[in-house]
Image: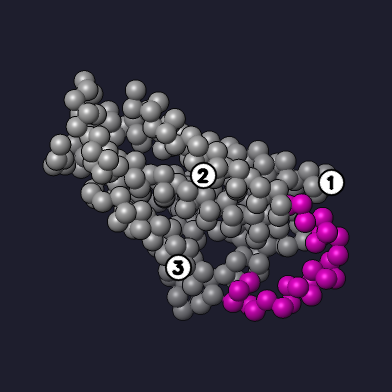
Amino acid sequence: MVFQREFKRNLKSLIIWGLIIAALILMMLSIYPQIASDQKALQTLMDVYPEGIKKAFGMDQLDFGTLLGFYGVEIYLITTLVGSIYVALLASGILVKEENDKTIEFLLSKPIGRTSIVGQKGAAVMTNVLLLNIIITIFSLLGFQFASGEDYSGSTFAALIFATLLLHLTIAAISFLLSAIMRRSRNIISLSLGVVFVSYFLHIIAGISDQLSWLKYISLFKYVDAGSIVEHGSMESLYIWIMLLLSFVCIGGAIVYYKRKDIAV
């Protein structure tokens, strides 16, 4: 009951955000053939960028003139950052809105426990995250058709998609925990978006400055860095385990806290 209600309630926003990301993917990939066909102009463009900017956005590791290199520089930013904003907004208000909207009394009057409420709402969030990443995958593959059959590594592309999904799940889990702990949706949304933007900012700083490279260990975006994934063909296993552990801890923490939370009805 709760899962179906939440899924239907959030379906419209999923469609809107999915279409926006899909349109951006297709638009960017449609210009790739023109960029790749003129290597001289491309090299001139790359020479303009400062070395710090190249390092920050993985341009020092990625070949902008190849399909996956272009995808890693241009498209990956869209799928990771914009997608993270969506999942943060989705997960941050899914629990607390029942209290803010004064519907928690009705929900708790039903023969359903708090653990089930949290579990079903969490499942609705994860389903939306999965569907968003399916949209990203489908439209990325459709966009690749603009490249006129250019060869690319399917396993490396799969690694980029997996990293994107894992990032979204981790951001969603953190925002979900905040939704269980806090009481005002406006504060939760601000904090959840802050997690996204601060993490991305730290990723940029870690890439620009060698002295601050240690910041990569506290930036989720650095864990899913496209340059490293394309260069090695996979995501580092340590980062995978860190993000999975963080996600499980946040989801588990949300369940435990919500069961004990003093909810005014």
The span shown in magenta is 29-54
Outermost residue toward the front in this view = 101
* Label 2 secondary element: helix
* Label 3 secondary element: helix
Residue carrying label 2? 165
From the viewer's perspective, is 33 left or right of 21?
right
Mark 2, residues whose alpha carbon is within 10 Å: few (<14), some, or many (≥20)? many
Q: Is residue 252 magenta?
A: no
Q: Is residue 41 magenta?
A: yes
Question: Which quadrant does the C terminus fall into?
Answer: top left
Precedes in sequence: disc 2 or disc 3: 2
Mark 1, residues whose alpha carbon is within 10 Å: few (<14), some, or many (≥20)? few
Question: Which quadrant does the N terminus fall into?
Answer: top left
Magenta residues: mostly which secondary structure?
A: helix
Residue for point 25% across, 34% down: 103
Looking at the image, which is closer to me, 184 or 101? Answer: 101
Q: x, y (%) of residue 74? A: 66, 59
Residue carrying label 3? 202
Residue carrying label 1? 148
From the viewer's perspective, is 49 left or right of 168?
right
Looking at the image, which is closer to me, 228 or 171? Answer: 171
Q: Give amino acid for label 1.
A: Ser
Q: x, y (%) of residue 262? A: 13, 42
